[in-house]
Image (cartoon, grey):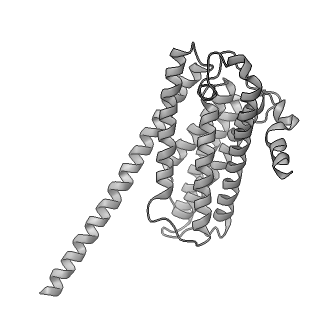
Amino acid sequence: MITQTLIYYLSQHPSIVTFRWSHIQSWGSTWSFLLTSIAFYLTFCALVHLFLQIFIKRGRTVPLGPIPAAYSLFMALISAVIFSGILLSTAAEIQETRWFWRRSKTPFQWLLCFPLGTRPSGRVFFWSYMYYLSRYLHMFRTFFTILRLRKLVSFQLVNNSILTFMSFLWLEFSQSFQVLAILIATLVYSIIYGYRFWTAVGLPCACFPFVLNCQIVLLGCNVACHVGVLSLHFMKGGCNGIGAWWFNSVLNGAILFLFLNFYVKMYLGKRKEVISEAMEEAEMMKVKDK
């Protein structure tokens, strides 16, 4: 009974089945809203950071109490709901529309490559819309970074802006690959935010950079899926929204470059710290020997 109720509310509810991406009916669906929101996000983050630099002494952080832990739990649940919803909706959509494309594609190929003429309506696009709206919730984590660490991380700003822009393009152009991308992303986000909540409440953390490794897995899966979309586009007679996909690929390439640059700097920085600490210990030992 509970399972049937969940299936109904996640994939069979009339508001999900009859969903249609529209600039008039869907909140936040216009280009002006998207660009204004991203500009406001970047400007407001810069102003908050500037305010802290001017009015609060260096080394002092703003206490946030249980807010980061509650936020991590909330985002983990939101990501899990979107993952479950789009998974069930994808299964239902494949079952109902397979007659239209089964001669040319397998279900997995459909996940990577929508048939030409696909419109942004129905179950999977409802959850794509939910994912797009959730990208604005992801932006709040930037403020926690600014308030707690007193840092304005450029990678975080650019990454959030690009991912929000890409999720808008998925809906606007009914872009192929978005279902698989959302499934992978929401699964990884639910794990990452669950882990952040775990550590925020004082439970032991992993002995390796858990979040960083999850992000590497996410980027690796995205690269592999992009290769699959490109192959199917030329082998199966075209994928819907391929123009937006090319632009998306450029943005994903920018994220990958920024992430690798950030990762290398962090890794080398930690390595230098370890080497300097080892040299200090060696010098202390020499002094003691004397």
| Residue plotted at (64% across, 33% down) | 179
Query: In x, y percent, where is residue 39?
Result: 62, 39
Percent position (x, y) of residue 270? 35, 61
| Vertical arrangement, residue 103 with respect to residue 12, above or below | above
Residue beneath the point at 84% across and 52% down: 2
- Whether residue 84 is visible to the viewer of this picture, yes or no, is yes
Whether residue 239 sits left or right of residue 277 in the image: it is right
| Residue ranking furthest to the top | 237
Q: Residue at x 80, y 27 (%)?
A: 20
User: From the viewer's perspective, is residue 119 above or below residue 180?
Assistant: above
**Residue 230 vs residue 44, the one in the foreground:** 230
Between 23 and 126, the one lying in front of the other is: 126
Residue 100, quarter of the rendered image:
top right
- Quarter occupied by residue 282: bottom left
Image spot of residue 235 (x, y percent): 52, 15
Q: Is residue 62 visible?
A: no
Q: In which quarter of the image is residue 275?
A: bottom left
Q: Is residue 277 above or below residue 161?
A: below
Left or right: residue 83 versus residue 184 is: right
